[in-house]
Amino acid sequence: MFTHLATGRHLAALVIACGLWANAQASPLPIDSLPLQADGEISVLPAGTHTGNFVLETPIHLRCAPEAVLDGGGHDNLLTIRAPGVTIEGCTLRNWGSNLTEMNAGIFVEPSATDVTLQGNRLRGPGFGIWSDGTRNLVVENNQVEGDTDYRSQDRGNGIHLINTNEARVLNNRVRHTRDGIYLGNSNNNLIQGNLMEDLRFGIHYMFSQSNRVIGNTTRRTRTGYALMQSRMLTVEHNRSEDDRNYGILMNFITYSTITDNFVSNVQRGQTGDDSMIKGGEGKALFIYNSLFNTIANNHFERSNLGIHLTAGSENNRISSNTFAGNEQQVKYVATRTQEWSVEGRGNFWSDYLGWDRNDDGLGDVPYEPNDNVDRLLWMYPQVRLLMNSPAIQVLRWVQRAFPVIRMQGVQDSHPLMRMPTTHLIQPTQETH
Protein backbone atom coordinates (compact mmCIF):
# COMPACT_ATOMS: atom_id res chain seq x y z
CA MET A 1 0.00 0.00 0.00
CA PHE A 2 2.83 2.38 0.90
CA THR A 3 4.39 1.69 -2.50
CA HIS A 4 1.16 2.70 -4.23
CA LEU A 5 0.97 5.88 -2.12
CA ALA A 6 4.56 6.81 -2.95
CA THR A 7 3.94 6.20 -6.62
CA GLY A 8 0.82 8.39 -6.51
CA ARG A 9 2.74 11.20 -4.82
CA HIS A 10 5.45 11.02 -7.47
CA LEU A 11 2.85 11.18 -10.25
CA ALA A 12 1.15 14.14 -8.61
CA ALA A 13 4.46 15.93 -8.23
CA LEU A 14 5.26 15.24 -11.87
CA VAL A 15 1.88 16.61 -13.01
CA ILE A 16 2.38 19.75 -10.91
CA ALA A 17 5.89 20.21 -12.24
CA CYS A 18 4.68 19.84 -15.82
CA GLY A 19 1.92 22.34 -15.17
CA LEU A 20 4.37 24.85 -13.70
CA TRP A 21 6.69 24.35 -16.68
CA ALA A 22 3.82 24.89 -19.12
CA ASN A 23 2.73 28.04 -17.28
CA ALA A 24 6.29 29.30 -17.33
CA GLN A 25 6.35 28.84 -21.07
CA ALA A 26 2.93 30.44 -21.55
CA SER A 27 3.56 33.46 -19.31
CA PRO A 28 6.48 35.68 -20.30
CA LEU A 29 8.39 37.51 -17.60
CA PRO A 30 8.21 41.30 -17.22
CA ILE A 31 11.14 43.04 -18.86
CA ASP A 32 12.18 44.57 -15.54
CA SER A 33 12.98 41.08 -14.26
CA LEU A 34 16.20 41.47 -16.26
CA PRO A 35 19.20 43.17 -14.57
CA LEU A 36 18.63 46.49 -16.32
CA GLN A 37 20.87 49.45 -15.55
CA ALA A 38 19.69 53.03 -15.77
CA ASP A 39 21.48 55.47 -18.06
CA GLY A 40 19.36 58.59 -17.76
CA GLU A 41 16.00 57.69 -19.30
CA ILE A 42 17.46 54.64 -21.08
CA SER A 43 17.48 51.13 -19.57
CA VAL A 44 20.64 49.24 -20.53
CA LEU A 45 20.84 45.44 -20.63
CA PRO A 46 24.37 44.46 -19.54
CA ALA A 47 26.63 41.97 -21.31
CA GLY A 48 25.86 38.28 -20.97
CA THR A 49 23.27 35.79 -22.20
CA HIS A 50 19.79 36.39 -20.80
CA THR A 51 17.44 33.48 -21.42
CA GLY A 52 13.66 33.68 -21.28
CA ASN A 53 10.56 35.20 -22.83
CA PHE A 54 9.80 38.76 -21.81
CA VAL A 55 6.91 41.20 -22.08
CA LEU A 56 7.05 45.01 -22.17
CA GLU A 57 3.86 46.45 -20.66
CA THR A 58 5.07 49.96 -19.85
CA PRO A 59 6.89 52.44 -22.09
CA ILE A 60 10.65 51.86 -22.03
CA HIS A 61 13.74 52.66 -24.08
CA LEU A 62 15.77 49.46 -23.95
CA ARG A 63 19.34 49.48 -25.19
CA CYS A 64 21.59 46.43 -25.11
CA ALA A 65 25.29 46.48 -24.29
CA PRO A 66 27.49 45.19 -27.15
CA GLU A 67 27.91 41.69 -25.64
CA ALA A 68 24.34 41.32 -24.39
CA VAL A 69 22.28 38.46 -25.91
CA LEU A 70 18.59 37.70 -25.44
CA ASP A 71 17.86 33.98 -25.92
CA GLY A 72 14.27 32.78 -26.25
CA GLY A 73 14.97 29.22 -25.15
CA GLY A 74 13.56 27.79 -28.38
CA HIS A 75 9.88 28.56 -27.77
CA ASP A 76 7.25 31.34 -27.97
CA ASN A 77 7.98 35.01 -28.61
CA LEU A 78 11.23 36.34 -27.26
CA LEU A 79 9.96 39.90 -26.71
CA THR A 80 6.27 40.81 -26.67
CA ILE A 81 5.55 44.56 -26.78
CA ARG A 82 2.18 45.71 -25.43
CA ALA A 83 2.94 49.28 -24.37
CA PRO A 84 3.05 52.32 -26.66
CA GLY A 85 6.20 54.38 -27.07
CA VAL A 86 8.67 51.48 -26.67
CA THR A 87 12.15 51.59 -28.23
CA ILE A 88 14.35 48.49 -28.60
CA GLU A 89 17.86 49.40 -29.72
CA GLY A 90 21.07 47.52 -30.45
CA CYS A 91 19.99 44.12 -29.13
CA THR A 92 20.97 40.62 -30.26
CA LEU A 93 18.00 38.24 -30.21
CA ARG A 94 18.19 34.53 -30.99
CA ASN A 95 16.51 31.16 -30.59
CA TRP A 96 12.83 32.00 -30.22
CA GLY A 97 10.05 29.60 -31.17
CA SER A 98 9.46 27.99 -34.56
CA ASN A 99 5.66 27.52 -34.35
CA LEU A 100 4.30 29.56 -37.26
CA THR A 101 0.70 28.76 -36.34
CA GLU A 102 1.29 30.41 -32.96
CA MET A 103 3.08 33.29 -34.76
CA ASN A 104 6.29 32.83 -32.77
CA ALA A 105 8.52 35.87 -33.36
CA GLY A 106 11.70 37.42 -32.10
CA ILE A 107 9.77 40.65 -31.48
CA PHE A 108 5.96 40.60 -31.45
CA VAL A 109 4.27 44.03 -31.48
CA GLU A 110 0.66 43.86 -30.28
CA PRO A 111 -2.12 46.26 -31.41
CA SER A 112 -1.88 48.35 -28.24
CA ALA A 113 1.79 49.09 -28.91
CA THR A 114 1.69 52.21 -31.09
CA ASP A 115 4.69 54.42 -31.84
CA VAL A 116 7.22 51.61 -31.35
CA THR A 117 10.80 51.92 -32.66
CA LEU A 118 12.99 48.89 -33.40
CA GLN A 119 16.45 50.08 -34.37
CA GLY A 120 19.83 48.49 -34.94
CA ASN A 121 18.91 45.02 -33.66
CA ARG A 122 20.26 41.65 -34.82
CA LEU A 123 17.78 38.76 -34.93
CA ARG A 124 18.36 35.12 -35.86
CA GLY A 125 15.75 32.42 -35.38
CA PRO A 126 13.40 29.98 -37.13
CA GLY A 127 10.05 31.77 -36.66
CA PHE A 128 9.07 35.28 -37.69
CA GLY A 129 11.69 37.94 -37.08
CA ILE A 130 9.48 40.96 -36.36
CA TRP A 131 5.68 40.61 -36.31
CA SER A 132 3.51 43.73 -36.15
CA ASP A 133 -0.18 43.08 -35.51
CA GLY A 134 -2.65 45.92 -36.01
CA THR A 135 -0.50 48.78 -34.79
CA ARG A 136 0.38 52.26 -36.07
CA ASN A 137 3.46 54.43 -36.50
CA LEU A 138 5.94 51.57 -36.21
CA VAL A 139 9.57 52.28 -37.15
CA VAL A 140 11.78 49.31 -38.11
CA GLU A 141 15.21 50.65 -39.04
CA ASN A 142 18.73 49.30 -39.57
CA ASN A 143 17.96 45.82 -38.25
CA GLN A 144 19.48 42.55 -39.45
CA VAL A 145 17.12 39.58 -39.60
CA GLU A 146 18.31 36.09 -40.49
CA GLY A 147 16.34 32.87 -40.63
CA ASP A 148 17.47 29.40 -39.60
CA THR A 149 18.67 27.41 -42.61
CA ASP A 150 18.16 24.15 -40.71
CA TYR A 151 14.46 24.61 -41.59
CA ARG A 152 12.99 24.38 -45.08
CA SER A 153 12.23 27.76 -46.65
CA GLN A 154 8.46 27.25 -46.38
CA ASP A 155 8.79 26.32 -42.70
CA ARG A 156 10.52 29.56 -41.72
CA GLY A 157 8.75 32.75 -40.76
CA ASN A 158 8.96 36.02 -42.66
CA GLY A 159 11.70 38.44 -41.71
CA ILE A 160 9.45 41.48 -41.15
CA HIS A 161 5.72 40.74 -41.10
CA LEU A 162 3.19 43.59 -41.02
CA ILE A 163 -0.49 42.69 -40.73
CA ASN A 164 -3.17 45.39 -40.38
CA THR A 165 -0.34 47.84 -39.77
CA ASN A 166 -0.62 51.44 -40.92
CA GLU A 167 1.81 54.35 -41.24
CA ALA A 168 4.86 52.18 -40.59
CA ARG A 169 8.37 52.98 -41.83
CA VAL A 170 10.60 50.01 -42.65
CA LEU A 171 13.99 51.47 -43.51
CA ASN A 172 17.46 50.18 -44.33
CA ASN A 173 17.08 46.67 -42.94
CA ARG A 174 18.85 43.55 -44.17
CA VAL A 175 16.90 40.27 -44.32
CA ARG A 176 18.36 36.88 -45.31
CA HIS A 177 17.28 33.23 -45.30
CA THR A 178 13.75 33.80 -43.99
CA ARG A 179 10.65 32.82 -45.98
CA ASP A 180 9.68 36.27 -47.29
CA GLY A 181 11.81 39.29 -46.56
CA ILE A 182 9.07 41.87 -45.88
CA TYR A 183 5.39 40.88 -45.93
CA LEU A 184 2.48 43.31 -45.77
CA GLY A 185 -1.15 42.21 -45.51
CA ASN A 186 -4.08 44.62 -45.18
CA SER A 187 -1.57 47.35 -44.34
CA ASN A 188 -1.89 50.88 -45.70
CA ASN A 189 0.14 54.07 -45.99
CA ASN A 190 3.49 52.47 -45.20
CA LEU A 191 6.98 53.29 -46.46
CA ILE A 192 9.36 50.43 -47.36
CA GLN A 193 12.68 51.99 -48.29
CA GLY A 194 16.35 51.11 -48.63
CA ASN A 195 16.12 47.47 -47.55
CA LEU A 196 18.40 44.67 -48.79
CA MET A 197 16.82 41.19 -49.10
CA GLU A 198 18.73 38.08 -50.15
CA ASP A 199 18.19 34.33 -50.50
CA LEU A 200 14.44 34.27 -49.84
CA ARG A 201 11.17 33.11 -51.35
CA PHE A 202 9.76 36.60 -52.01
CA GLY A 203 11.77 39.74 -51.29
CA ILE A 204 8.79 42.08 -50.74
CA HIS A 205 5.32 40.54 -50.67
CA TYR A 206 2.13 42.64 -50.72
CA MET A 207 -1.42 41.34 -50.18
CA PHE A 208 -4.61 43.45 -49.98
CA SER A 209 -2.84 46.72 -49.19
CA GLN A 210 -3.05 50.21 -50.61
CA SER A 211 -1.27 53.54 -50.73
CA ASN A 212 2.13 52.08 -49.91
CA ARG A 213 5.53 53.30 -51.13
CA VAL A 214 8.29 50.84 -52.06
CA ILE A 215 11.41 52.86 -52.77
CA GLY A 216 15.09 52.08 -53.25
CA ASN A 217 15.10 48.44 -52.12
CA THR A 218 17.30 45.64 -53.49
CA THR A 219 16.51 41.92 -53.83
CA ARG A 220 18.98 39.20 -54.77
CA ARG A 221 18.67 35.46 -55.34
CA THR A 222 15.02 35.28 -54.37
CA ARG A 223 12.35 33.20 -56.08
CA THR A 224 10.46 36.45 -56.73
CA GLY A 225 11.91 39.86 -56.06
CA TYR A 226 8.73 41.93 -55.67
CA ALA A 227 5.45 39.99 -55.36
CA LEU A 228 2.72 42.64 -55.59
CA MET A 229 -0.70 41.04 -55.21
CA GLN A 230 -4.30 42.20 -54.78
CA SER A 231 -3.27 45.76 -53.93
CA ARG A 232 -3.86 49.24 -55.29
CA MET A 233 -2.27 52.67 -55.38
CA LEU A 234 1.26 51.38 -54.82
CA THR A 235 4.28 53.52 -55.68
CA VAL A 236 7.19 51.26 -56.62
CA GLU A 237 10.26 53.33 -57.53
CA HIS A 238 14.05 53.02 -57.77
CA ASN A 239 14.17 49.38 -56.69
CA ARG A 240 16.60 46.73 -57.94
CA SER A 241 16.12 43.02 -58.67
CA GLU A 242 19.46 41.28 -59.22
CA ASP A 243 19.81 37.58 -60.08
CA ASP A 244 16.34 36.65 -58.85
CA ARG A 245 14.58 33.55 -60.15
CA ASN A 246 11.15 33.15 -61.77
CA TYR A 247 10.02 36.79 -61.41
CA GLY A 248 11.73 40.13 -60.91
CA ILE A 249 8.52 42.14 -60.43
CA LEU A 250 5.22 40.23 -60.29
CA MET A 251 1.96 42.16 -60.51
CA ASN A 252 -1.14 40.11 -59.72
CA PHE A 253 -4.37 42.14 -59.68
CA ILE A 254 -2.59 45.44 -59.10
CA THR A 255 -4.54 48.58 -59.98
CA TYR A 256 -3.92 52.34 -60.09
CA SER A 257 -0.24 51.93 -59.22
CA THR A 258 2.99 53.50 -60.44
CA ILE A 259 6.00 51.33 -61.32
CA THR A 260 8.90 53.59 -62.32
CA ASP A 261 12.71 53.78 -62.39
CA ASN A 262 13.25 50.17 -61.34
CA PHE A 263 16.17 48.01 -62.51
CA VAL A 264 15.66 44.26 -63.11
CA SER A 265 18.54 42.10 -64.32
CA ASN A 266 19.18 38.41 -65.00
CA VAL A 267 15.89 36.79 -63.99
CA GLN A 268 16.17 33.14 -64.98
CA ARG A 269 14.08 30.02 -64.73
CA GLY A 270 14.31 28.58 -61.22
CA GLN A 271 12.88 25.91 -58.99
CA THR A 272 9.31 27.03 -58.48
CA GLY A 273 7.94 24.56 -55.93
CA ASP A 274 4.39 25.76 -55.22
CA ASP A 275 5.23 29.46 -55.54
CA SER A 276 5.08 29.98 -59.31
CA MET A 277 2.01 31.51 -60.91
CA ILE A 278 2.69 29.47 -64.06
CA LYS A 279 4.37 26.11 -63.70
CA GLY A 280 7.60 25.73 -65.58
CA GLY A 281 7.51 29.36 -66.76
CA GLU A 282 10.56 31.27 -67.92
CA GLY A 283 12.32 33.76 -65.74
CA LYS A 284 10.24 36.93 -66.21
CA ALA A 285 11.67 40.36 -65.54
CA LEU A 286 8.10 41.75 -65.33
CA PHE A 287 4.95 39.65 -65.10
CA ILE A 288 1.58 41.43 -65.30
CA TYR A 289 -1.47 39.32 -64.47
CA ASN A 290 -5.01 40.74 -64.34
CA SER A 291 -3.70 44.22 -63.56
CA LEU A 292 -5.23 47.44 -64.88
CA PHE A 293 -4.82 51.23 -64.92
CA ASN A 294 -1.15 51.24 -63.94
CA THR A 295 1.72 53.43 -65.12
CA ILE A 296 4.88 51.48 -65.99
CA ALA A 297 7.60 53.86 -67.12
CA ASN A 298 11.37 54.45 -67.10
CA ASN A 299 12.20 50.93 -65.94
CA HIS A 300 15.14 48.82 -67.15
CA PHE A 301 14.61 45.10 -67.83
CA GLU A 302 17.64 43.20 -69.06
CA ARG A 303 19.31 39.80 -69.60
CA SER A 304 16.32 37.69 -68.54
CA ASN A 305 14.58 34.72 -70.15
CA LEU A 306 11.57 36.97 -70.81
CA GLY A 307 11.39 40.74 -70.62
CA ILE A 308 7.65 41.20 -69.99
CA HIS A 309 4.74 38.75 -69.86
CA LEU A 310 1.25 40.26 -69.97
CA THR A 311 -1.85 38.10 -69.58
CA ALA A 312 -5.30 37.53 -68.05
CA GLY A 313 -7.06 40.75 -69.01
CA SER A 314 -4.25 43.14 -68.12
CA GLU A 315 -5.35 46.23 -70.04
CA ASN A 316 -5.38 50.02 -69.87
CA ASN A 317 -1.83 50.17 -68.55
CA ARG A 318 0.42 53.02 -69.68
CA ILE A 319 3.74 51.45 -70.72
CA SER A 320 6.41 53.81 -72.05
CA SER A 321 10.03 54.94 -71.77
CA ASN A 322 11.17 51.52 -70.55
CA THR A 323 14.26 49.63 -71.71
CA PHE A 324 14.09 45.98 -72.77
CA ALA A 325 17.68 44.95 -73.45
CA GLY A 326 19.22 41.57 -74.20
CA ASN A 327 16.30 39.42 -73.06
CA GLU A 328 16.00 36.02 -74.73
CA GLN A 329 12.41 36.93 -75.59
CA GLN A 330 11.24 40.49 -75.17
CA VAL A 331 7.45 40.14 -74.94
CA LYS A 332 4.89 37.44 -74.31
CA TYR A 333 1.32 38.66 -74.70
CA VAL A 334 -1.48 36.12 -74.38
CA ALA A 335 -4.69 37.84 -75.49
CA THR A 336 -6.58 38.80 -78.64
CA ARG A 337 -6.73 42.60 -78.41
CA THR A 338 -4.18 45.09 -79.67
CA GLN A 339 -2.27 46.97 -76.98
CA GLU A 340 -0.41 50.16 -77.79
CA TRP A 341 2.75 50.54 -75.72
CA SER A 342 3.55 54.19 -76.25
CA VAL A 343 2.26 57.28 -74.48
CA GLU A 344 1.97 60.70 -76.09
CA GLY A 345 4.23 59.74 -78.97
CA ARG A 346 6.94 58.12 -76.86
CA GLY A 347 7.43 54.36 -76.73
CA ASN A 348 10.09 52.06 -75.30
CA PHE A 349 13.63 51.01 -76.20
CA TRP A 350 13.94 47.48 -77.64
CA SER A 351 17.43 46.11 -78.17
CA ASP A 352 16.21 43.89 -81.04
CA TYR A 353 14.41 46.66 -82.94
CA LEU A 354 15.53 46.64 -86.58
CA GLY A 355 13.84 49.82 -87.79
CA TRP A 356 15.40 53.15 -88.71
CA ASP A 357 15.16 56.84 -87.82
CA ARG A 358 15.46 58.89 -91.03
CA ASN A 359 14.62 62.27 -89.47
CA ASP A 360 16.83 61.73 -86.42
CA ASP A 361 14.11 62.56 -83.91
CA GLY A 362 15.06 59.65 -81.65
CA LEU A 363 11.99 57.60 -82.62
CA GLY A 364 11.80 54.62 -84.95
CA ASP A 365 9.96 55.23 -88.21
CA VAL A 366 8.20 51.84 -88.20
CA PRO A 367 6.34 50.30 -85.25
CA TYR A 368 7.89 47.59 -83.11
CA GLU A 369 5.75 44.44 -83.14
CA PRO A 370 7.40 41.77 -81.00
CA ASN A 371 5.06 38.84 -81.62
CA ASP A 372 3.29 37.25 -84.56
CA ASN A 373 0.93 34.34 -85.22
CA VAL A 374 3.79 31.88 -85.08
CA ASP A 375 4.66 33.04 -81.55
CA ARG A 376 1.05 32.59 -80.53
CA LEU A 377 1.07 29.09 -82.01
CA LEU A 378 4.17 28.24 -79.98
CA TRP A 379 2.60 29.54 -76.76
CA MET A 380 -0.55 27.51 -77.30
CA TYR A 381 1.25 24.34 -78.46
CA PRO A 382 4.78 24.23 -76.99
CA GLN A 383 5.55 20.97 -78.79
CA VAL A 384 5.61 22.93 -82.06
CA ARG A 385 8.99 24.30 -80.95
CA LEU A 386 10.47 21.14 -82.44
CA LEU A 387 9.69 22.66 -85.85
CA MET A 388 11.10 26.13 -85.10
CA ASN A 389 13.67 26.05 -87.92
CA SER A 390 11.62 24.02 -90.37
CA PRO A 391 10.57 25.34 -93.82
CA ALA A 392 6.92 25.23 -92.73
CA ILE A 393 7.48 27.71 -89.90
CA GLN A 394 9.53 29.99 -92.14
CA VAL A 395 6.72 29.97 -94.74
CA LEU A 396 4.17 30.89 -92.05
CA ARG A 397 6.27 33.86 -90.96
CA TRP A 398 6.77 34.99 -94.59
CA VAL A 399 3.02 34.78 -95.33
CA GLN A 400 2.26 36.84 -92.25
CA ARG A 401 4.69 39.58 -93.29
CA ALA A 402 3.51 39.56 -96.90
CA PHE A 403 -0.22 39.59 -96.10
CA PRO A 404 -0.76 41.69 -92.96
CA VAL A 405 -4.50 41.08 -93.23
CA ILE A 406 -3.90 37.90 -91.20
CA ARG A 407 -1.70 39.61 -88.66
CA MET A 408 -2.63 38.75 -85.08
CA GLN A 409 -3.82 41.27 -82.53
CA GLY A 410 -1.11 41.98 -79.99
CA VAL A 411 1.41 44.43 -78.64
CA GLN A 412 2.50 47.34 -80.80
CA ASP A 413 4.90 50.13 -79.97
CA SER A 414 4.22 52.78 -82.60
CA HIS A 415 7.04 55.09 -81.44
CA PRO A 416 9.98 52.89 -80.39
CA LEU A 417 12.94 54.73 -78.90
CA MET A 418 16.26 54.60 -80.74
CA ARG A 419 18.32 55.32 -77.61
CA MET A 420 18.16 53.75 -74.17
CA PRO A 421 16.33 56.09 -71.74
CA THR A 422 17.46 54.32 -68.57
CA THR A 423 21.26 54.59 -68.57
CA HIS A 424 21.03 56.36 -65.23
CA LEU A 425 19.77 53.11 -63.68
CA ILE A 426 22.77 51.03 -64.78
CA GLN A 427 25.29 50.93 -61.97
CA PRO A 428 27.61 48.41 -60.30
CA THR A 429 25.93 45.76 -58.22
CA GLN A 430 25.32 47.00 -54.69
CA GLU A 431 27.88 45.64 -52.25
CA THR A 432 26.62 43.19 -49.66
CA HIS A 433 26.74 44.81 -46.23
Image (cartoon, helix red, strand yellow):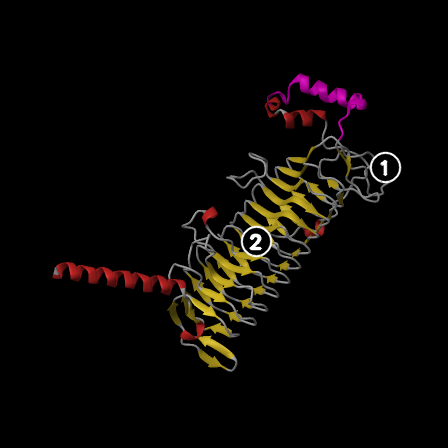
- Occupied quadrant, residue 118: bottom right
Q: What residue lies at 68% left-to-right and 36% top-to-bottom?
A: 312
- Occupied quadrant, residue 12: bottom left
What span is in magenta? 386-409
Single out the residue that lies furthest toward the front.
1
- Residue type at tag 1: Arg
- Crowding near the residue tagged with mark 1, few <14, some 14–19, many ≥20 C-alpha atoms within 10 Å: few
Instruction: From the viewer's side, name the closer residue of 85 and 374.
Output: 85
Which residue corresponds to mark 2? 183
Is residue 215 depicted above or below 346 in this figure? Answer: below
The x, y position of residue 160, in whole percent, is 54, 57
Q: Nearer the viewer, mark 2 or mark 1?
A: 2
- Occupied quadrant, residue 214: bottom right
Instruction: From the viewer's side, name the closer residue of 364 and 149.
Output: 149
Answer left or right for 73 relative to 427: left
Kind of element beneath mark 1:
loop
Please say whether residue 260 is one of the residues in the magenta stretch. Answer: no
The x, y position of residue 289, in whole percent, is 66, 40
Answer left or right for 428 relative to 346: left
Which residue corresponds to mark 1? 358
Residues under numbered marks 2 and 1 in contact, where contact means CB atoms less than 8 Å apart: no
Q: Is residue 266 visible?
A: no
- Residue type at tag 2: Tyr
